[in-house]
Image (cartoon, grey):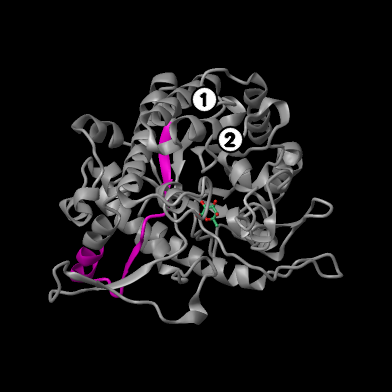
Amino acid sequence: MSMYRDFPEDFVWGSATASYQVEGAPFEDGKGASVWNEFEKIPGAMRDDVNGDIACDHYHRYPEDIAHMKNIGLNGYRFSLAWSRIFPDGYGKVNQKGIDHYKRVCETLLKNGVEPYVTLYHWDLPLALQKEFGGWESRETVKYFGEYASKIGEEFKGLIKYYCTTNEFLAASDVAYSMGLIAPGLKLEKKRVNQIRHHLLLAHGTAVSALRAADPGAKISLAENSSFMVPLIDTPEYVDAAKKAFREVNAHFLTAVMEGKYLDCYLEKEGADAPVFTDDDMKIISQKLDWLGLNIYFGKRLRPAPETKEGYHIFEETDLKRQTGIADFYFEPAAMYWGSRIAYELYGLPIYITENGKRSETDKLEPDGKVYDDERIRHLRLQLLYMAKAVREGIPVKGYFHWSLMDNLEWHHGFRPRFGFLYVNYSTMERVPKLSAEWMKEVIRTGRIA
Ligand code: FCB
């Protein structure tokens, strides 16, 4: 057998979680409330009216969860810190017990050969900041996010090297403050939401400065689920159209971070609702990052369209059988290749896939004690094949974080959607590695994808 590897020995194989989705223990050891603790109380806000009081009990069971990572062969773990464990009121008084907890988590990871990749903000804003300042509507929240980042940089030097400032601007702004689907569950008008978008970008940039000042060795990125463009053939015309579309469709988020400006097409489209910003803001927002984290679940197929003003045409999706099960998005494994390639060709940063995964509502524990999640393996294999293509062509895709390590609280969708390598039995909190975990273990061991 040839010794050829699709993925190099030093490839980072990880899994990902977020504090609110797995930790539980919302008020333990001095933690302050987050916006979720209010949101959960609204009848109907959470499917089945569940809450995050226990979630996966990861707060207490992290040693067992890390043992599972080690057993699968995972050498990276992307997780988020709950801001309100560090600053219960969002700012001011520091909660040492929260810091100590995450130090123990990092030490346990490192002892087991797993590198921490830490997200500072994965949607669980301290409630006090929402109440006092309207959350991301205010620049006060941006300022306090910087202070939080600075504290983390100081305290965790030597323990955390890789950071994502924020996770997915779109959910943190629009889904939370315009659609009202996730906490704090507001439906504000466009102008205010656009300002919130801008403040989140500014929070990212402010955290970059703060982390760098506190820990010059930190390797900083963000995790973005941009709209990824998939040209239907690999010719310069198609690829150029895809790049143009990528920059324009993501003009309010990733393009602004990477290029330091809002494209005219965005400002014109928003008109009087466009965000208010200064040149200084744009400088802070667009500091050069060390790497780029992409959450890739979907792709938009497109062709060049000289007959249109934009010059490209994005295909409408009609094939229901190909739905991923997340909102109305469609499975397109080539997004793994094209997302990485286009982002790299435009911006030149090393790429990590900070999330990618498959939702299922049918995973179940069989009488033989196993979980046969064939569908996840089938899905994952195609995703990884396209990632291998990128690696083979020399695009610096350095790591992959599967969403998720374990089944968890899928925000307002509750516990029914399962995304994990580990099946969680919510009555006993027992974790059972699914077939996909065994499959993944072999991919990691051999560095090959069939
Ligand atoms: C991503 C989120 C993550 C999880 C997955 C399924 O958008 O970052 O927390 O909800 O989707």
Residue 82: image tag:
2
Q: Residues within 10 Å of mark 2 (few under 14, many from 20)?
A: many
Q: Nearer the viewer, residue 304 or 323?
A: 323
User: Whole-percent x and y of residue 340?
Assistant: 37, 56
350 to 418, vertically: above or below:
above
233 to 173, vertically: above or below:
below
Mark 1 belongs to which amino acid? Ile
Q: Residue at x 49, y 60 (%)?
A: 6
Start-end of magenta stretch: 219-242
Q: Is residue 397 magenta?
A: no
Mark 1 secondary-structure assignment: helix
Q: Residue at x 18, y 74 (%)?
A: 305
Quick check: can you spot residue 279?
Answer: yes
Quadrant of res 205 = top left
Q: Residue at x 39, y 60 (%)?
A: 390
Q: Nearer the viewer, residue 74 or 212?
A: 212
For the residues labelled 2 and 1, say whether their Cβ atoms are less than 8 Å apart.
Answer: no
Mark 2 belongs to which amino acid? Ala
Quick check: can you spot residue 161?
Answer: no
Q: Earlier in the sequence, mark 2 or mark 1?
A: 2
290 horizontally vs 263: left or right: right
Q: Residues within 10 Å of mark 1 (few under 14, many from 20)?
A: many
Q: Nearer the viewer, residue 422 or 139?
A: 139
Mark 2 secondary-structure assignment: loop
Quadrant of res 142 = top left
Q: Quadrant of the C terminus?
A: bottom right
User: Whole-percent x and y of residue 299?
Assistant: 39, 66
Residue at which label 1 appears:
152
